[in-house]
Image: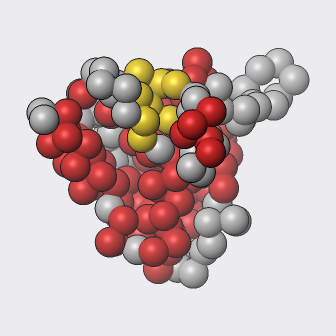
């Protein structure tokens, strides 16, 4: 069984366990859902690989490893849509907890330049898209590291 197949089977178990009575979890990505989706990433990584995601900036290296592992196995972002959204919510939640960002939706101006999904907003008003960054990591490889994405966000916060 491939790395992706193992992750997907455990992800499905955790995802199902986290659903409502109708056994459906909407990925409508409103800001109030992101924290719960991040927790699914924590549970799945622990069950699958014994990887402890503790919401620290250092744990983002684990997200890089997971996504790059999926990519190396030949999986596509389209096939892994839900998994990548959940991992993106984890990245965003690290930013919320460590940098003081808040979950938010893009405003009209941000939507006009391509932001179309829930993301995180810094206290200075800047908007970041951690979910999109995880998709870019899957599509482009290590050049789009989420650990580096966090490092850039944290350095911009100090300006």
Residue 106 visible, this orientation: yes
- Provide residue 143's location: percent of width, then percent of height: 32, 72
Quadrant in which residue 17 is drawn: top right
- Relative to residue 125, is residue 144 depicted above or below? below
- The colour scheme is secondary structure
Q: Nearer the viewer, residue 109 or 94?
A: 109
The answer to whether 24 appears left or right of 77 in the picture is: right
The answer to whether 117 appears left or right of 56 in the picture is: right
Residue drawn where x is 58% and y is 30% of the image = 107
Quadrant in which residue 105 is drawn: top right
- Relative to residue 99, is residue 32 depicted above or below? above
- Provide residue 69's location: percent of width, then percent of height: 43, 70
- Provide residue 61's location: percent of width, then percent of height: 27, 55
Q: Nearer the viewer, residue 157 or 130?
A: 157
Q: Give the number of marks.
A: 0
Residue 47 visible, this orientation: no
Q: Which residue, as the protein is rendered here, is positioned at the far right? A: 22
Residue drawn where x is 36% and y is 48% of the image = 50
The answer to whether 65 appears left or right of 139 in the picture is: left
Quarter of the image containing the C terminus? top left
Q: Nearer the viewer, residue 65 or 129?
A: 129
Residue drawn where x is 36% and y is 65% of the image = 144
Quarter of the image containing the N terminus? bottom right
Q: Nearer the viewer, residue 108 or 129?
A: 108
- Provide residue 28's location: percent of width, then percent of height: 72, 32
């Amino acid at each position: 069984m491939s790395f992706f197949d193992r992750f997907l089977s455990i992800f499905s178990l955790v995802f199902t366990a986290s659903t409502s009575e109708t056994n459906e979890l909407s990925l409508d990505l409103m800001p109030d859902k992101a924290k719960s989706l991040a927790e699914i990433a924590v549970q799945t990584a622990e069950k699958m690989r014994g990887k402890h995601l503790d919401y620290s900036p250092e744990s983002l290296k684990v997200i890089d490893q997971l996504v790059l592992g999926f990519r190396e196995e030949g999986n596509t972002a389209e096939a892994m849509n839900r998994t990548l959204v959940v991992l993106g919510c984890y990245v965003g939640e690290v930013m919320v907890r460590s940098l003081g960002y808040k979950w938010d939706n893009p405003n009209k101006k941000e939507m006009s330049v391509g932001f179309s999904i829930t993301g995180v907003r810094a206290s200075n008003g800047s908007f970041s898209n951690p979910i999109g960054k995880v998709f870019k990591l899957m599509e482009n490889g290590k050049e789009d590291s989420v650990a580096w994405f966090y490092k850039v966000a944290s350095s911009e916060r100090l300006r």
